[in-house]
Image (cartoon, rainbow, N blue to C red):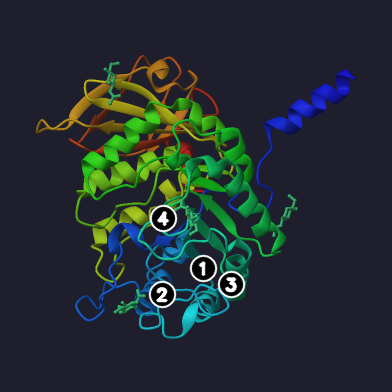
Amino acid sequence: MKYVVVFYVMVGSVLALDNGLALTPPMGWLTWQRFRCITDCKKYPDECISETLIKRTADKMISDGYLAAGYNYVGIDDCWMEHDRDQEGRLVANGTRFPNGMKHIGDYLHNKGLKFFLYQDYGNKTCAGYPGVLGHEKTDIDSFVSWGVDYIKLDGCNVEVSKMDSGYPEFGKMMNESGRPMVYSCSWPAYQDKPDYESIQEHCNLWRNADDIQDSWSSLTSIMDWFAARPELASYAGPGHWNDPDMLLIGNFGLSVDQARVQMAVWSVLAAPLMMSVDLDTIRDEFKQILLNSKVIEVDQDELGKQGMRVWNKSKCEIWTRELSAGFAVAFVSRRDDGAPYTLRVTFEDMKIPKQNYIVQELFDQENIRNIRSDDERFETRVNPSGVKFYKFVPGQNNEIKRSAEVIYFLE
Ligand SMILES: *[C@@H]1O[C@H](CO)[C@@H](O)[C@H](O)[C@H]1NC(C)=O
Ligand SMILES: *[C@@H]1O[C@H](CO)[C@@H](O)[C@H](O)[C@H]1NC(C)=O
Ligand SMILES: *[C@@H]1O[C@H](CO)[C@@H](O)[C@H](O)[C@H]1NC(C)=O
Ligand SMILES: *[C@@H]1O[C@H](CO)[C@@H](O)[C@H](O)[C@H]1NC(C)=O
């Protein structure tokens, strides 16, 4: 009997959506944050939600190295549909902006080695007022399958919140029964005061926890504060099931280069999906380098899948720490606005990492590699106003590591 109980507890603690997908946080590109619901292609030909936008983005994902860096989903958020279903009750893509329909988009992406991410809404209507899936769930899933969709974001506008606890799992079950593996992103908790995260992590690959991100430092920091205030959320994240603090603002209008690095670092500590939402044809090189930083992406995609959190907050500076399969990622974020970079001198305890020898590398290449010893009293760093220093602490072998050996360790 005791044996059975132990077995049950073990199984219970790892109950999660078992579709083999999103074993690391999904990466890709999505229309909403940058392109919203722009539908006037006459006035804004380069920005309207259309086949043209998706194809030129897909081409850039390949030619500029985003796919090679791991960004493989290309997503169309709201505003892709006609206002009415067809005579068989099926969803129809806007005929002017998607003249070849959605299967054509799926084929185009798949031929380039990319995956197709599509938005819908659990309610009567999407947030922008297009038809939602409610009452047409099976028909719509059949359409997604026939178009080759690989990832569904299911929003929660225009449906009773009380219906979500049963509705999102039912839709997930129907997705599963379709036989096509599709990542399931649920906006379910974002609409609730007291989300049932046990159930959410069991039925969704990822979930939007809170409000939409906006293109500003204040929106970014308010999301950081939101997660910092809820450290318990980290326990629901793991391979196949992730919290989603929303899209990357990087490369758009609202963040400086330093602030963009803050988002990339904190999102990686949070094991967040990395969904870009930016015009890849016009993005400036310094932002592109942030999005393509392989050392930071490696932190986000760490196979242990353990979400980190804010562990320290003083003098308008913060430390965000994540345990990795080998070592720790530690981000020092400054939210100060007084001119010069600010010097921080902190202990192992402040960083919440074990006292031992480490080889320490700054992941945005702002510093040389350092050798830190277990008997060092303080770790010192200097952070730009509204900026970040982001380090990987890898345990060192012994106290006497030679300088050359230490460099080799990192280069291999
Ligand atoms: C389809 O897109 C065209 C061009 O952007 C627009 O004029 C039309 O109103 C759209 N139709 C719907 C139903 O959104
Ligand atoms: C959805 O539509 C049905 C039928 O028109 C209606 O009865 C129901 O109240 C609507 N639900 C919401 C949340 O608008
Ligand atoms: C459906 O669920 C089963 C059991 O959890 C899983 O093994 C299978 O891979 C899932 N299939 C799809 C298409 O999601
Ligand atoms: C940082 O910590 C201080 C003191 O512990 C607290 O008053 C403040 O609200 C915290 N800041 C944020 C943004 O959470």
Mark 2 vs ligand 1: CB under 8 Å? yes
State the separation of the CA atoms marked 1 and 2: 19 Å
Residue receiving disc 1: 116
Residue receiving disc 2: 82
Tell me which corner region of the image, top left, top right, bottom left or bottom right, holds residue 147: bottom right
Residue receiving disc 3: 143
User: Could you classify mark 2 by the number of other residues whose Cα lies within 10 Å: few (under 14), some (14-19), or many (20 or more)?
Assistant: some
Q: Earlier in the sequence, mark 1 or mark 3?
A: 1
Q: In this picture, is 247 found above or below 229?
A: below
Q: Earlier in the sequence, mark 1 or mark 2?
A: 2
Mark 3 vs ligand 3: CB under 8 Å? no
Residue receiving disc 4: 275
Q: Nearer the viewer, residue 165 or 389?
A: 165
Q: Are marks 1 and 3 in contact (CB under 8 Å)?
A: no
Of the two numbered discs 1 and 3 in the rendering, the one whose residue sits closer to the viewer? 3
State the separation of the CA atoms marked 4 and 2: 25 Å
Image region (quadrant) for ligand 4: top left
Of the two numbered discs 2 and 3 in the rendering, the one whose residue sits closer to the viewer? 2
Q: Is residue 265 left or right of residue 194?
A: left
Q: Identity of the amino acid at label 1? A: Phe
